[in-house]
Amino acid sequence: MRLFGNQLVKMRQERNLRVGELAALLGCHPSYITHLEKGRRHPPRIEDLRRLAMAMHLSAPDLQTLQQAAIWTAAVTRVEDLGFSPADTLLHDAASNLFDQK
């Protein structure tokens, strides 16, 4: 599930930032951003979310949306780690509905 990654891509593109530009602002390698966006890494911790928000000049509501996406993504990832398919869970449906409306 890539709820967090999808939100990150959307917010980055709305600000006309390329992956490399965002990585430079954060002082990280561009592959870290790419892995976040593609769901290959777990969503970052709250401190790192705040750094992302500052780098992209996110509003408080946008930061909240990104935090919620991180929480949902982490929860669904845990469900997958337990061997369940998130598509078979109410969690997947709730998360998908929440972020499809935004």
Image: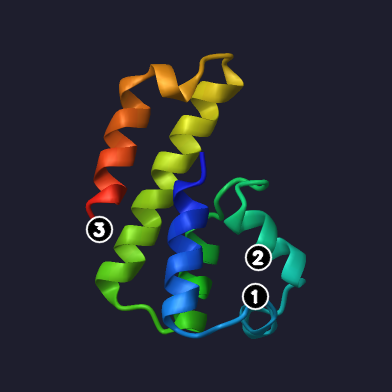
- Specify the label residue 33 is tagged with: 2
Label 1 secondary element: helix
| Tag 2–tag 1 contact (CB < 8 Å) | yes
- Specify the label residue 5 is tagged with: none
Q: Residues within 10 Å of mark 1 (few under 14, many from 20)?
A: some
Give the side of residue 35 with respect to residue 81, left or right: right
Label 3 secondary element: loop
Looking at the rendered structure, the kind of residue marked 2 is Ile
Closer to the eye: label 2 or 3 = 3
Sequence-wise first label, 2 or 3: 2
Q: Residue at x 22, y 52 (%)?
A: 101
Residue that numbered label 1 is attached to: 19
Give the side of residue 90 with respect to residue 3, left or right: left
Q: Residues within 10 Å of mark 3 (few under 14, many from 20)?
A: few
Inter-mark Cα distance, 2 to 3? 22 Å
Rendered location of residue 83, percent (x, y): 58, 14
Residue sitting nearer the eye, 28 or 97: 97
Rendered location of residue 8, percent (x, y): 48, 64
Say above or below: 56 vs 31.
below
Q: In this figure, what is the number of numbered marks?
A: 3
Residue sitting nearer the eye, 46 or 31: 31
Q: Residue at x 67, y 62 (%)?
A: 34
Looking at the rendered structure, the kind of residue marked 1 is Val
Q: For residue 62, what is the image quadrant?
A: bottom left
Give the side of residue 27 with respect to residue 65, left or right: right
Q: Residue at x 47, y 81 (%)?
A: 56
Say above or below: 2 vs 22.
above
- Specify the label residue 102 is tagged with: 3
Inter-mark Cα distance, 3 to 1? 23 Å
Inter-mark Cα distance, 2 to 1? 6 Å
Rendered location of residue 82, percent (x, y): 57, 16
